């Protein structure tokens, strides 16, 4: 089964592919040196226009937010060009052959959804970011901005637009991963108790979910700036509302799809074990009723095999959580929590 990751891509990936195709460097260095420098250029322009005399807290927070926008394009590119195709390839291993075509159709549909249905999310999310900036205008006045028409404020508005449109892709990624995994979970996928991952082959679900979570969690680098604006601005509720939504997305992007797949896998496991029990009981009854020594010996061997298969299948863990996935999840959650604790107790 083949999956064409280049068939349709989100606007940012198309932009980055144009640079990557012409660059002698690798993908990540090229992206960082092209699209990745945009937030730093806008930040430098803003600082130059207001004279550069700003509090150190703003400078550090602004640089962290710029670093977020430098790293995010690399993660978006990797999600579309590597993570999504790898997931489809691995998912085919635990999907019956007859369902592979349906799997490909689902994956292709959500790949297109990620790329072509980004506008509504982008408009709403960017609108909220701009609302937070304009509603907290007092914060920018404290930095030396003299009015809404001040060139410095216009430059920062461009920074906010770039922030909103880029991070909106991460929001779209979380939605895409959840919807895609939910629909794929409705297929009659198989559980291989001898799969090398020790999870019946379901590690592919954890892989896809945690990579999405990691992409979103980088947004935590923008939290110090959000908290700094909220501390001085007049409408902190908007800022904290966005932060709550963001943290919820981090947790939900992993928990919702993996819990759903776990439930579906347990249903499949329960049905399979029931079939095995019926086979064992039927064979055991035939063994007791038989008086042919040779047939009894054959049935006993078969009965032992069935019981062994039952025990192996019953022991397999079906929650897509390996040690590496757990460590990634912990780091994804700890970063925003660290900033939250810093804001609450140290700021």
Image (cartoon, rainbow, N blue to C red):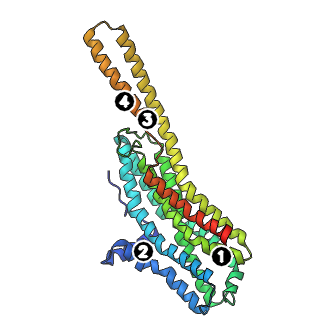
Marks 2 and 4: which is nearer the front? 4
Q: Earlier in the sequence, mark 3 or mark 2?
A: 2
Is disc 1 placed on a helix, strand or loop?
helix
Is disc 2 placed on a helix, strand or loop?
helix
Pointer 3 residue: 315
- Residue 219 horizontal/vertical position (percent): 54, 68
How far apart in space, not on screen, are marks 3 and 4 (Cα)?
Answer: 10 Å
**Label ID, residue 309:** 4
Marks 3 and 4: which is nearer the front? 3
Tell me if residue 113 can be seen. no
Residue drawn at the location 39% of the way across and 33% of the way down: 312
How far apart in space, not on screen, are marks 4 and 1 (Cα)?
Answer: 59 Å
Q: Nearer the viewer, residue 51 or 94?
A: 51
**Label ID, residue 15:** 2
Residue positioned most to the left: 294
236 vs 104, left or right, is: right
Where residue 150 sits, quadrant-wise, is bottom right
235 vs 324, left or right, is: right
Marks 3 and 2: which is nearer the front? 3
Residue drawn at the location 57% of the way across and 79% of the way down: 60
Tag 4 near tag 1, CB within 8 Å? no
Q: Nearer the viewer, residue 77 or 124?
A: 77
Question: Mark 3 packing: few (<14 Cα in 10 Å), some, or many (20+)?
Answer: few
- Residue 284 horizontal/vertical position (percent): 38, 15
How far apart in space, not on screen, are marks 1 and 2 (Cα)?
Answer: 32 Å
Residue drawn at the location 40% of the way across and 39% of the way down: 191
Residue drawn at the location 39% of the way across and 51% of the way down: 104
Tag 2 near tag 4, CB within 8 Å? no
How far apart in space, not on screen, are marks 1 and 3 (Cα)?
Answer: 50 Å
**Label ID, residue 21:** none
Is disc 4 placed on a helix, strand or loop?
helix
């Amino acid at each position: 089964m083949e999956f064409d990751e280049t068939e349709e891509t989100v606007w940012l990936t198309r932009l980055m592919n144009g640079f990557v195709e012409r660059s002698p460097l690798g993908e990540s260095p090229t992206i960082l040196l092209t699209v990745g420098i945009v937030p730093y250029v806008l930040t430098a322009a803003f600082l130059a226009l207001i004279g550069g005399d700003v509090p150190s807290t703003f400078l550090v927070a602004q640089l962290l937010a710029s670093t977020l926008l430098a790293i995010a394009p690399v993660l978006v590119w990797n999600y579309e060009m590597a993570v999504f195709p790898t997931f489809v390839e691995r998912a085919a291993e635990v999907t019956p052959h007859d369902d592979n075509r349906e799997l490909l159709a689902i994956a292709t549909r959500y790949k297109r959804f990620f790329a072509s249905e980004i506008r509504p999310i982008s408009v709403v999310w960017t609108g909220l970011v701009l609302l937070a900036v304009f509603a907290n205008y007092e914060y920018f006045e404290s930095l030396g901005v003299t009015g809404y028409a001040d060139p410095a404020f216009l430059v920062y508005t461009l920074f906010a637009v770039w922030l909103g449109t880029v991070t909106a892709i991460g929001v779209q990624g979380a939605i895409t991963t959840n919807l895609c995994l939910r629909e794929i979970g409705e297929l009659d996928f198989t559980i291989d108790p001898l799969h090398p991952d020790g999870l019946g082959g379901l590690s592919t679900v954890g892989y896809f979910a945690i990579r999405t979570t990691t992409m979103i969690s980088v947004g935590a680098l923008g939290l110090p700036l959000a908290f700094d604006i909220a501390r001085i601005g007049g409408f902190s509720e908007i800022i904290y509302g966005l932060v709550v939504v963001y943290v919820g997305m981090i947790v939900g992007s992993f928990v919702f799809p993996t819990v759903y797949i776990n439930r579906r896998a347990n249903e499949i496991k329960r049905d399979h074990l029931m079939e095995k029990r019926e086979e064992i009981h039927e064979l055991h009854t035939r063994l007791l009723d038989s008086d042919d020594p040779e047939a009894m010996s054959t049935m006993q061997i078969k009965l032992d095999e069935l019981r062994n298969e039952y025990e192996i299948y019953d022991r397999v863990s079906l929650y897509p959580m390996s040690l590496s996935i757990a460590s990634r999840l912990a780091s994804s959650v700890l970063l925003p929590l660290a900033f939250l604790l810093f804001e609450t107790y140290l700021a």
